[in-house]
Image: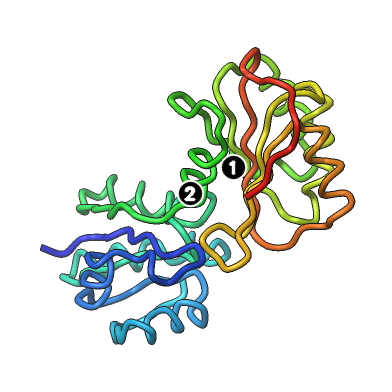
């Protein structure tokens, strides 16, 4: 039966893809990719020859109907992004919702995503947490942080290396400089780095050592933080 598959892809280390993901990608009629050049390297590595088509945030609204038409006509389609699970701070939600509204089967495979390894590796309580993704770059940023000031669950944010120090300073302003936190950078890659400590410690650390790569910030919830020294791995 034709359907839409959502396939997680490695966030760094190509070995993190699952056997099932390779099998599905090898057998679908069409793969929708955020960046066909980047995806092409992944497919070449695993000798996957399925047809490839661009699908990203700038064309997804126009492409959704045609994708649904393809599936309804009998094609099986897989959606992947540059890295991680589609729909998590990446294109995917609109297509999934539209398929569901049209009665088209949707199946999501488990697999790589940056937020879970960063959370578990942080040493901060992870039985209850909230994922905030990227904070608004300008409008609504202060409002969002103010709304999180009383959050008791562990909080997870994605951030650009260029805004990391600014964001850590803003988090310290809203949550207190001694709030426990962790910054994970370049997860699963050769230069993976996990730095743990207070928000003030982390801000000072990265102010002296400007970061590169993909970043996840984990912050303990209200009354859950404890001040302390910085630790790294």
Which disc number belongs to residue 162? none
Q: Position of residue 24 (x, y in %)?
A: 22, 69
Location of mark 2 (residue): 88
Q: Residue at left 77%, top 48%?
A: 164
- Above or below residue 145? Residue 63 is below
Badge 1: how crowded within 10 Å, few (<14), some, or many (20+)? some
Viewed as shown, does residue 18 lie left or right of 127? Answer: left
> How many dots with numbers?
2
Q: Residue at left 38%, top 84%?
A: 45
Q: Position of residue 147 (x, y in %)?
A: 68, 20
- Above or below residue 198? Residue 65 is below
Q: Position of residue 108 (x, y in %)?
A: 28, 52
The local secondary structure at tag 2 comes to: loop
Badge 2: how crowded within 10 Å, few (<14), some, or many (20+)? some
Viewed as shown, does residue 57 lie left or right of 112? Answer: right
Determine the CA span between mark 2 and mark 1. 8 Å
Q: Nearer the viewer, residue 178 or 173?
A: 178
Q: Nearer the viewer, residue 115 or 126?
A: 126
Location of mark 1 (residue): 133
Question: Disc 2 or 1, which lies upstream in sequence?
Answer: 2
Viewed as shown, does residue 167 lie left or right of 157? Answer: right
Q: Are marks 2 and 1 in contact (CB under 8 Å)?
A: yes
């Amino acid at each position: 039966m034709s359907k839409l598959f959502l396939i997680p892809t490695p966030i760094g280390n190509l070995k993190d893809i699952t056997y099932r993901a390779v099998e599905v990608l090898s057998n679908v009629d069409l793969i929708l990719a955020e960046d066909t050049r980047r995806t092409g390297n992944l497919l070449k590595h695993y000798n996957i020859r399925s047809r490839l088509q661009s699908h990203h945030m700038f064309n997804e609204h126009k492409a959704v109907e045609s994708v649904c038409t393809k599936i309804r006509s009998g094609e099986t389609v897989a959606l992947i992004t540059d890295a991680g699970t589609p729909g998590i701070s990446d294109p995917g939600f609109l297509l999934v919702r539209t398929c569901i509204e049209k009665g088209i089967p949707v199946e999501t495979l488990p697999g790589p995503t940056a937020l879970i390894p960063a959370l578990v590796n942080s040493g901060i309580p992870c039985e209850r947490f909230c994922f905030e993704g990227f904070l608004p770059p300008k409008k609504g940023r202060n409002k969002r942080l103010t709304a999180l000031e009383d959050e008791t669950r562990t909080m997870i944010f994605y951030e650009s290396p260029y805004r990391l120090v600014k964001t850590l300073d803003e988090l310290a302003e809203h949550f207190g400089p001694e709030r426990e936190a962790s910054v994970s950078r370049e997860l699963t890659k050769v230069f993976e780095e996990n730095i743990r400590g207070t928000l003030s410690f982390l801000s000072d650390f990265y102010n002296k050592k400007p970061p590169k790569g993909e970043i996840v910030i984990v912050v303990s919830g209200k009354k859950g933080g404890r001040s302390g020294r910085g630790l790294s791995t």
